[in-house]
Image: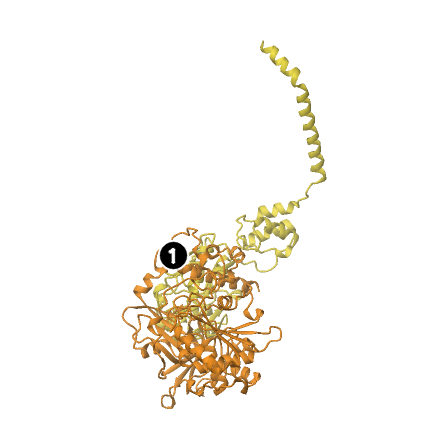
Chain colours: A orange, B yellow
Amino acid sequence: MAEIRGKFTFPGGTHPPENKHFSENRSIEPVSVPKQVAVLLSQHLGAVCVPTVAKKEAVLAGQMIGKSDAFVSAAIHSPVNGTVKDITLLPHPVIGRTMGIVIDVDAENNEIKQPVNGQFDKTFNPENYTVEQICRAVKEGGIVGMGGAGFPTRVKIEPNPAMPKEILLINACECEPFITCDYRVMLEWTWQFLAGVRLAARAAGCEKIRIGIEDNKPEAIEVLTNAVKELGGKEDIRVVPVKTKYPQGGERQLIQSVLGKTVPTGSIPPTIGVCVLNVGTCAAIAEAVATGNSLTHRVVTVAGCAIAKPGNYYVPIGMRVEDLIAYCGGLTETAAKVVMGGPMMGFAIADLSTPLTKTSGALTFLTKAAVTRAKHEKQQTPCIRCGRCLTVCPEHLNPTRIAHAVKYFRMDIAQDYYLSACIECGCCSYVCPANIEITGYIKTGKLLQARAKRRLG
Amino acid sequence: MVLASVMELVNNAWPAALLALGLGSLFALILLIASIKLRVVVDPKIDAVHKALPNIDCGACGFAGCASYAKAVVTNPELLGKCAPGGSDTSNAIAGILNLQMSGSGAPMRPVIHCRACEQDKTYFADYDGIIGCTSANAQPNVQACAFGCLGYGGCVRRCRFDALHIIDGLAVIDYEKCTGCGACARGCPRELIEMVPFTQDIMMTVACNSKEGGKNTRTFCKVGCIGCGLCSKQCDLFTTENNLARLDFARYEPSEAAQTAMDKCPTGNIVFRGKNAPAPREAGQKPAASAK
């Protein structure tokens, strides 16, 4: 196989060690059903769901258990057959303690859910479904962006006359170290993934489809290029290899790389006619539209030195981290830190009873040695004005300036330097020779700003 | 010889001297006219009000400093009583200057912290080694089991300009002797634990917990948390229990036997006194005094 080199890229960014070897060659494996699941009511951006079931009520797998009438929101569904044990505060991986539904699993009446990729092949025709059908299936399936932010997909793909979309860009970069779930989906569920891509393009009214993949995944590029060829060129689908660089998978960066367009600061891709979707999301769209299944399971990468059996697992959403750890053979003795997501943008979890959500693509288990090598355990020293953070910032900000403004509560200065434009990729903290937690301060600044706004409004 | 040179100087320099004198007089005249024509009339009340204020520029009134508040309060008497550090004394003084009548209770506003859990009373799931500061620590979910209580990283301490707040054993403690009631600490707390309360008494009773968690979880997370049992609301109508949390109606509070009984009966010792020389709260885990009898 000829070496594939992506020439498209964006200014800035870094090259952290990829560490994909833990799980990239392990196929997707459905996990056994845990004894109890905890489905959080807030797994997406937008309004929090209201439970539609009561305590002690029996629920079926796929049944809607929470919904919201707000436009930007997504329904949630039970991944198992069982009874509602409690509706209570539960640990959330990102926002602390939020309401969730605890379901006791009916042990006798549950089968392990198998992936549905076998139902899709190259004969799949998206024109069998109307735009309304697709949008309704996506809405009722509770599908959200599975790359991390969790923006409700229905809002993205629904035709909007005010912002017509021309290009559907599939974000298949997976630039974050350790994570391989999208890679495995592309390799194993190729036809399901492509069916989802074509359905989304049909719903959004996009003529062109571009799939951006980093060139460190040559197999995925080959498989997808061949599959697109087999489709016979009815649609304008093109697989675009891009340079391996972090954060290539940020939607603004990918648009810059693949399409050469810049999304203006403070606005979103639809304003320039682009709709960006993640690989997992496309697979979920195909499943929801073709089989009517709602989003109750997802592929989660379990990686890192501190776990016995790393791999890619097909996990019910709502499974607790400790149950998944037990399934994967437990933690090794050297385990020191559990991160939901990858090491660059993920969230460290303190409470192992935290349930997985629709947006948790990976669990990274780091050893004490790996954590100590990381920056934040070392001594922070004053900023030496080297400007490395400015060179790597993919959003062309001045991170150190913002961080110092936040440190001294000068939110006016922080805002003058476009605090809110930060995508929190962590490149600045990664390269800082003075070990300053720049991204940490910027995140703090965003929280301070939100609090000030809440107090005024 | 000397005399001659002096005379020569005078003879040669007199035009210059005359010119200087003339110019001086001209400018003096311009300044005189300008000072009459361009005079800025300052309300003497502003100056008097400024003098009556504590002049610490704390910003609690919402203005940049005492001078701007003085200017604002003279033109808009509705702003009277905004000076928290000065309290009712200052407000009365300003009212006297402006010929106004003070209305309302005039009780000074002071902060109370709705948490009493010291380090040994709390449960932690993991070590936090990020940026030292409450807002940053609060952004890391579930490091401290209780999602509502004091984090003890001193966000309030850094904002206090009067050295009236200290972290003692992982809990923010207010020094009511030094506190001026400017409210900066309440704005600095990411968990909104600090409430500004009218201190109608020198020592106020308060429910020192903010946990809206169910009773069972609160018990697991904290030795001194409010479990929302509702015993206090049964004893005394000043207390209300909602969302697994008891609250006291501060505006109506007066020391009474019913309130004291409620405090003694609280199973977790969560109702405490706050204020200058307030008696120490019951120790964590100690049985209620009423049931011990």
Residue found 36% across the figure and 59% down from its top: A375
Residue that extends furthest to the left in the rendered view of this protein: A333
Residue B274 in picture, x, y percent from top left: 44, 61
Q: Using residue A412 as the reference point, say whether residue A192 is left or right of it.
A: left
Q: Specify whether B49 is left or right of B144.
A: right
Q: Which residue is mark 1?
A: A435
Residue B78 visible, this orientation: yes
Tell me the residue at 42%/78% (across/down).
Answer: A223
Amino acid type at circle 1 is Asn
Crowdedness of circle 1 by 10 Å Cα count: few (<14), some, many (20+)? many
Q: Secondary structure at mark 1?
A: loop
Please give the count of numbered marks on the rendered protein: 1
Residue A230 x %, y %? 46, 82
Q: Position of residue A295 (x, y in %)?
A: 46, 81
Nearest the camera: A77 or B254?
A77
Question: Residue B81's quadrant in the figure?
Answer: bottom right
Q: Residue A61 in the image: x percent, y percent?
A: 43, 87
Above or below, comparing residue A371 to residue A197 in the picture: above
Please give the chain letter of the residue carrying mark 1: A
